[in-house]
Image: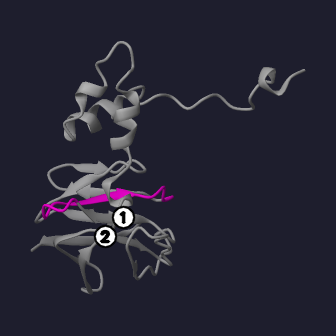
């Protein structure tokens, strides 16, 4: 049996646009034209944009100030940063170590990054206990799906809560 005829132990990953979240993400980023092509010729172009922009280079924008509601400590973030108990940024930006007495924050829990236009986003990095943005409603960040941060929202990483201020 030729190797090209062998069965792969796992299926191919779904193409961009297969998951419902892809359509939401594409709408948020103005890329819906890549989802609506019947010949799928836009899929490769959409994949180019489906990687978070922070991977290309570390950016700075405004400043996000996180105030821990349990101990009143303040963290100022002015460039792309990985937050966690023992963060490893792997070139994605600054490493910010968070106080975690309950051990519910993952080592590399979440990423806060800027789009170069003073907009800040948080994205969960596959943490066990999740990343939530709480405003009028609570939104859980799905792994690697960014949520825009805004003044006055509450950020929950594991069991720790942080009030968000933006400068």
Q: Main secondary structure of the magenta part?
A: loop
Magenta range is 115-128
List the residue tagged with mark 1.
111
Residue 118 percent location from the top left of the image:
13, 64
Foreground residue among 79 and 101: 79
Q: Nearer the viewer, residue 125 or 5?
A: 5
Residue in view at x 24 percent, y 86 percent: 72
**Left or right for 7, reference 124:** right
Task: Examine the structure image and report whether residue 160 is included in the region drawn in magenta.
Answer: no
Between discs 1 and 2, the one toward the N terminus: 2
The residue sitting at the top extreme is 38
Instruction: Tell me the quarter of the picture where residue 26 sits.
Output: top left
- SS under mark 1: strand
Which residue is under mark 2?
A: 80
CA distance for labels 1 and 2: 7 Å
Residue furthest to the right:
1
Q: Is residue 160 above or below residue 153?
A: below
- Quadrant where the N terminus sits is top right
157 or 167: nearer the viewer:
167
Q: Position of residue 48 (x, y in %)?
A: 37, 41
* Within-10-Å neighbours for mark 2: few <14, some 14–19, many 20+: many
């Amino acid at each position: 049996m030729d190797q090209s005829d062998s069965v792969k132990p796992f299926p191919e990953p779904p193409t961009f646009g297969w998951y419902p979240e892809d359509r939401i993400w594409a709408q948020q980023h103005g890329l819906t034209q890549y989802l609506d092509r019947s010949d799928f010729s836009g899929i490769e172009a959409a994949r180019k944009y489906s990687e978070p922009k922070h991977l290309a280079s570390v950016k700075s924008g405004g400043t996000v100030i996180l105030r821990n509601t349990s101990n009143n400590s303040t963290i100022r973030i002015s460039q792309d940063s990985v937050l966690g108990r023992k963060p490893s940024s792997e070139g994605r930006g600054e490493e910010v170590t968070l106080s975690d007495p309950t051990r519910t924050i993952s080592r590399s829990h979440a990423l806060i990054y800027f789009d170069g236009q003073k907009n800040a986003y948080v994205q969960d990095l596959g943490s066990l206990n999740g990343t939530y943005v709480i405003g009028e409603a609570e939104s859980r960040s799905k792994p690697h799906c960014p949520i825009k941060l805004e003044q006055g929202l509450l950020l929950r990483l594991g069991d720790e809560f942080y009030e968000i201020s933006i400068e």
